[in-house]
Image (cartoon, rainbow, N blue to C red):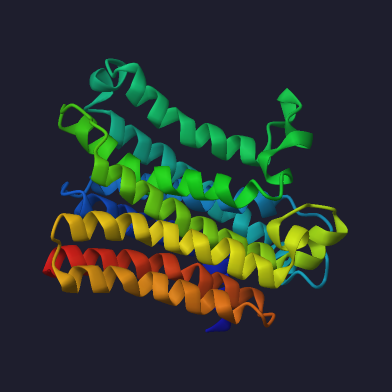
Amino acid sequence: MKKIASFIFFGNFFYGICAVALSFEASIQQGFPLNTFWYYILLFCATTVYYTEAYIDVISVDLNNKRSVWYLKNKSLMIRSETILTLFMILAIFFVCKDVWKQIFEMPSMQWILILVFPLVAILYYGIEFLQFKKHSLRSNGWMKPFVIGFVWSGTVTIYPVLFHTIETNEAFGITLFGTLLFLKNFMYITVLCIMFDIKDYAADYNQQLKTFVVRVGLRKTIFYIMMPLCIVGFGTFLVYTISHHFPSVRIIINAIPFILLITVAWSMHQRKSILYYLAIIDGLMLVKAICGIISFTLF
């Protein structure tokens, strides 16, 4: 059982599952039908491949980093996995685009910007070696890192599902107030999760002089002055809209559950946890958020 859990979480398949689930939530909450099967295959594969790329080339590892040790032991398995996922990703791109390639090339500039900006930022997060950006990747800016990840995730799971649906149905894409607030809500939520991971990496970041929030201001101030306000802003924006538009009380309460759990887990960060705790519990909050959002808008 532990080997299966390690494969799912260390192999980044859980990130792919969370991306698909959050995309389901965003489509349902914004009143759009779900995307095609191949769209979600593409999203799952691209997310998993992207996160695995950071570890696949590991040569020497810190024995205290269980994830790096696992990759070194299972390198051939993950190379095969990356190859298979990449092939599925290429196949999915073909099926997603084969009937709408004309609409894609006829899109207005705003839609092109929305499609390209999130992958571009994701690439710059790691850096592009042949453009000499490797030394100046966005992840090297400790305080910026969680916001960059939150921005990419929020755009991918909030904007993309609606954008690609409008392309498939040849409809006009428009930016709505509710969609913008949902983007902000997801952005703040995932940013807080990323800061939690920075707490896990405190010792390594401190030694590498990577000025993350927890390195700069300490654990207590990070929790109370950064993470908590971000939670409040994220859910507050959504709460204002739902109350002002008379959403059912049950729907509002169910959507509050992930933020209550987020604050609870943030409080628990005073004690160090294992890597699997961070991957299963902290990242699991993304899945909880998606499930609560889907249930609240489907049943209530």
* Residue 181 image offset from top left, x and y in percent: 32, 48
* Residue 233 image offset from top left, x and y in percent: 43, 57
120 lies above or below 84 = above
Residue 149 seen in render = yes
Residue 5 seen in render = no
Residue lying farthest right?
Answer: 207
Q: Quadrant of residue 202?
A: bottom right
Residue drawn at x 25%, y 46% is 178
* Residue 148 image offset from top left, x and y in percent: 57, 44
186 lies above or below 297 = above
Relative side of 223 to 235, left or right: right
Circle count: 0
Relative side of 26 to 279, left or right: left
Residue drawn at x 62%, y 77% is 269
218 lies above or below 48 = below
* Residue 266 image offset from top left, x and y in percent: 55, 74
Residue drawn at x 46%, y 55% is 188
